Image (cartoon, rainbow, N blue to C red):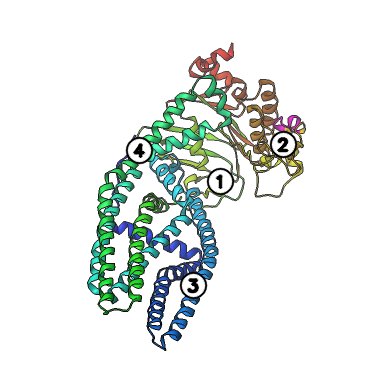
Amino acid sequence: MTEKKRKISVKERAIGIARVAKITYKASPLAVFMKVAGVLVNSILPIVTTYFAALTTTALAEAYAGDPTAGARALEYVLVTAALGVAMTAWSSVEQYITQFVRYKIDSAINDQLYNQFLGLEFWQYDDKRTADLFDKAQQFARFFGYVFDRLTRITQEFVTMIAGLTALIFVSWWLGLILIAAVIPGILIQYRLSKAQIAHWDTNVKIRRIGNMLEWKMFDVSSITEMRIYGMVKHLMTMRRKLRDTDEKERIEFERKYIFKRLGADVLEAAAEVASLIFTALQIIAHTQPIGQFLYVQQVVSRALSGSRGMVSEFNSIDEDIANLFDYNEFMALPQAQHREKRLLSKPGRIVFDDVSFHYPNNKTSVLENVSLTIDQGAHIAIVGENGAGKSTFIKLLLGLYNPTSGKVIVDDNSLSDIRLEDWHSHLGVLQQDFSRYSFANAKNNVMLGEINRPYSEERFNEAIKRAEAKTFLEKLPKGVDTYLDQWLDDDDGTPGVDLSGGQWQRMALARNFYRDSPIVILDEPTSAIDALAESRIFKRLLADKKRTIITISHRLTTVEKADIIYVFEAGKIVEQGTHDELVQKHGAYFRMFESQLR
């Protein structure tokens, strides 16, 4: 359940934090400058205010003692102190707006970058576990990027506050400043070690958190409730969720427990330094070597320095997971993008050739396809059949250009598919996969229109598409017809509720989306598995009547494949038989054995 730990060096931390600053600066330079100004104002202005408050206290004491000029000075200091207080109050109001503005700007920028990176990867990376791990952690970081920047700002502010306090104390007495520095260093080092341990824990338990998140999502999935309750899974899944949570969270709490006494010792040392500073200042005032306002000044400066130290340590502790995800985010963003292909394909493609194609997936040397050769002429209808794991879906992935062959070539009109721009190739394809998408956020009409978004909407094509997919009848019966949302949790502006479709109805929607696309090459992977036999027969009768399209079908239904011009039978990644339905039945080979029960 664990993964190999990855150590993060101090240099990597600095580089990662610098990247946060760089991304934020690109998103909004003005907002960053305002944040920096805010750090300086929030760190230094209170010490300046304390300085004038101490002068006010001294002047008031002198006026009380009979100094005739001290009263005027006291009033001046009061006015300056009040003006500084007003400035701090005004800045607090402005700072709230700046915080929200910066968060919006950088969240937008970082999420756009993450989506562009994810959607531009090589297709094989979507099947790669390491890429999935990195994306999980990068997504976690991107989701809270604005808050991470706020937290880094607070760390910087607390650091500046601590330095400003120590500097101000050194001007009073250099050895008091040294004592205070010596007092805060142990606490910082202890917290640094604790944070490193927590980061290592975060990296180690990625899988545990992923399983836990998937489990929680499934438990709140309405479509799964029936099976979970009927099969008595609820208690078991709750126990499983609790164990995963405890494995992650309890270990993290253990780190805190181990450091309790060390942190307590550091706190005692800081408190002793503060008491020593105040006693020293009080003795100087009693000896008349320092003005009376010096006590207030030293007390406030020491308090600010310690507060800055504690705040910095506390914020650093809370950012440990973000820092860990930051480096994973950087690593994910550094993954290579899909290679740009130069060859254009502007006209309707004709012949497709698989020339001695073999393939194995990255990071796996087991061959999935071996020496596959076949030709698909324009307007042909071919069928690909075989048992599960025979290589049919992988064949389709290579045909779509999602993967390049390990050896051999896929050729389209005398051009290697690996050289053709995928955007051009995909614009000629209509694909209905077994795990087709259900766009439940859209109404029925938009579900179909998403099949072709690069051309103006055509009412005629839409009506023809839903008719060919046998979807017209049930769509007309929906509460608002084709304008009805296809999810029971969504309703229209007038309150009309959405509806849930059956599996067969969703499959017809996917078919309609494919037909609306009106592509010259149609690829169907188990296209009618949830549709009744009579409707399937009518759909394929219309589909096969169009001799202008090239149709490639994968199916386990005899009625779907028997009308194909040529059928290819796959076994263990190889083509073991090919021919028409009648020819293959007469051979009594692999095809006959596969469909024997349906033939009867």
* Residue furthest bottom in the image: 68
Amino acid type shown at disc 3:
Gly
Can you give x and y, in whole percent of width and height, for residue 148 in the image?
44, 56
Distance from Cα at disc 1 to Cα at disc 3? 66 Å
Residue 471 falls inside the magenta stretch: yes
Image coordinates of residue 527 in percent, x first then y, are 60, 29
Q: Which residue is mark 2?
A: 497
Q: Which disc is residue 85 wearing?
A: 3
Assess whether mark 3 and mark 4 are in contact (beta carbons under 8 angstroms): no
Q: Looking at the rendering, which quadrant does residue 506 occupy?
A: top right
Q: CA distance from mark 4 to mark 1?
A: 52 Å
User: Magenta region: which residues?
Assistant: 468-475
> Comparing marks 2 and 4, which lies closer to the viewer?
4
Q: Which residue is mark 4?
A: 250
- Where residue 357 sits, quadrant-wise, is top left
Up-down relation of residue 79 to residue 595 (above or below): below
As helix, strand or loop, the secondary structure at mark 2 comes to: loop
Q: Earlier in the sequence, mark 2 or mark 3?
A: 3
Mark before the other along the chain sequence, 2 or 4: 4
Q: Residues within 10 Å of mark 4 (few under 14, many from 20)?
A: few
Cβ atoms under marks 4 and 1 closer than 8 Å: no
- Camera-nearest label, 4 or 1: 4
Please tell me which of labels 1 and 2 falls first in the chain: 1
Amino acid type at circle 1 is Trp
Residue type at mark 4? Lys
At mark 1, the secondary structure is helix
Residue nearer the viewer, 134 or 376: 134
Query: Which residue is at the front of the view, 252 or 104?
Result: 252
Quarter of the image with the N terminus is top left
Question: In the rendered view, does 118 fall on the left or right side of 3?
Answer: right
User: On the image, numbered disc 1 is attached to which residue?
Assistant: 425
